[in-house]
Amino acid sequence: MKQIYKLFNQLRSILLISISSMTILLCLVQIILRYFTFLSVRPFAWGDEIIRLSSIWIIYLGISLGIKENAHFFVDYFLNRIKSKRVLFIIQLITDLIVIGIFMIITIQGFKYALTNINSMLQNINISMAIFYLSIPIGSCFCIFEYILKLIYGSNYSEILLGTTKKEGDK
């Protein structure tokens, strides 16, 4: 399982870095062409579409990274008042199962939505919209995978599977 998780984590990192880099580079080129060149040189007509739709991939892949890092916002005011570790464990288990269920619904609906858009092409370039909408179910599957590992190994599962430890002062 450690090897699978390391491969999974590397794949997610490579996707996030490459999509983010491509988006930033394309955005920079669009700005330079729009504001710093002669009027005869126009920005790529398809650039804005690609930038906008690539952000969907970045968001959904980033959600799973936030789960791994335990970096998402949560309100623990009432949980801090519960002294019983067993009750806290049960509440966390129920919460995680509800979140997994929601991500399963998002995954199923995301695949349906992507499949309905296979023949829809971007306005300025011949790329299917489904490529961008597949980020929703794929990112949701990444999130489900993270939550399942959390249920199996506990809240510090990424440290266990990646063989890392957090420094003092980290969350």
Image (cartoon, grey):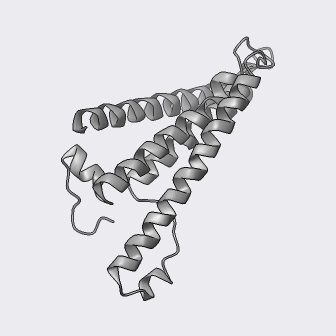
Q: How many marks?
A: 0
Residue ID at (27%, 69%)? 169
**Quarter of the rendering containing residue 133:** top right
Q: Please indicate whether residue 41 sits to the left or right of residue 15 in the image.
A: right
Measured along the vertical axis of the image, is residue 35 above or below residue 43?
Answer: below
Of 81 and 46, nearer the camera is 81
Is residue 31 visible in this depiction of the protein? no
Residue ID at (64%, 37%)? 108
Measured along the vertical axis of the image, is residue 16 above or below residue 127?
Answer: below
Q: Quadrant of the N terminus?
A: top left
Of 123 and 61, nearer the camera is 61
Q: Please indicate whether residue 9 sits to the left or right of residue 73 in the image.
A: left
Q: Position of residue 124 (x, y in %)?
A: 78, 16
Outermost residue toward the top? 126
Q: Quadrant of the C terminus?
A: bottom left
Q: Please indicate whether residue 9 sits to the left or right of residue 63 in the image.
A: left
Residue ID at (74%, 14%)? 125
Measured along the vertical axis of the image, is residue 35 above or below residue 166?
Answer: above
Of 33 and 113, nearer the camera is 113
Q: Position of residue 16 (x, y in %)?
A: 46, 35
Residue ID at (68%, 23%)? 130
Of 63 and 48, nearer the camera is 63
Is residue 115 visible in this depiction of the protein? yes
Q: Position of residue 148 (x, y in %)?
A: 40, 49
Q: Position of residue 37 (x, y in %)?
A: 71, 22
